Amino acid sequence: MKDFDKEKDKTALNEFFGPVISIYSRAQAIADGILVDVSSMALEAGFKLPVAITRAAWKDCVEWSEQDNSAQVYQDESGRLWDVLFMAYYAICTSRETGDRLHFSLYRVPKDGSSAEAEEVSLKLIVGPGDSAESVVTILLPEES
């Protein structure tokens, strides 16, 4: 097996692509609110890796307020988050696909000010490297990357 020299590889990449202009880390995305860290509840749902959900997926599938309860049907964010995480974990456990991406679906009441019935929504799960090259999970809307 070939040993890799990180400095040599970095130099070769810089020679080919040029110097890195900017790096936006997962930790920065969480601090900025672009990603929402849901790792503690994900652990309860069965995940063994850190899990974050994009702000757009959070707004569509998790976010719920008292005003939404008054206008629509009673729900809470922790229950909605549990549904997302449970269905993501179930999809992982039952999938026969290989790779770093998995599409799954769940039913959630849309946050539109009037709906009381759940509708099916699709989400995407990606397993990729975190800031220190550790495996992490990100849940996002299908059109997000």
Image (cartoon, helix red, strand yellow):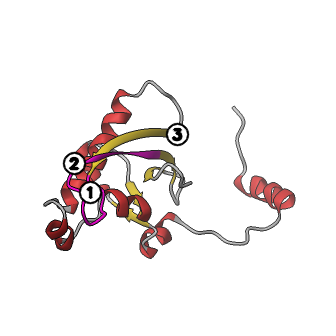
Residue that lies at the very extreme toward the front in this rendered image: 114
Q: CA distance from mark 1 to mark 2?
A: 7 Å
Q: CA distance from mark 2 to mark 3?
A: 22 Å
Three-letter code for the amino acid on which mark 3 is drawn: Asp
Please say whether residue 36 is one of the residues in the magenta stretch.
no
Please name the residue shown 78% across and 54% down the image.
Answer: 8
Residue position marked by numbered label 2 in the rendering: 44
Q: Earlier in the sequence, mark 2 or mark 3?
A: 2
Disc number for residue 40 = 1
The reply to whether callout 3 and callout 1 are in contact (CB within 8 Å) is: no
Give 92 or 62, whichever is nearer the viewer.
62
Give 103 or 32, whichever is nearer the viewer.
103
Relative image position of residue 1 (x, y in whole percent)? 69, 31
Residue position marked by numbered label 3 in the rendering: 100
Three-letter code for the amino acid on which mark 2 is drawn: Glu
Q: Secondary structure at mark 1?
A: helix
Give the residues in magenta: 109-125
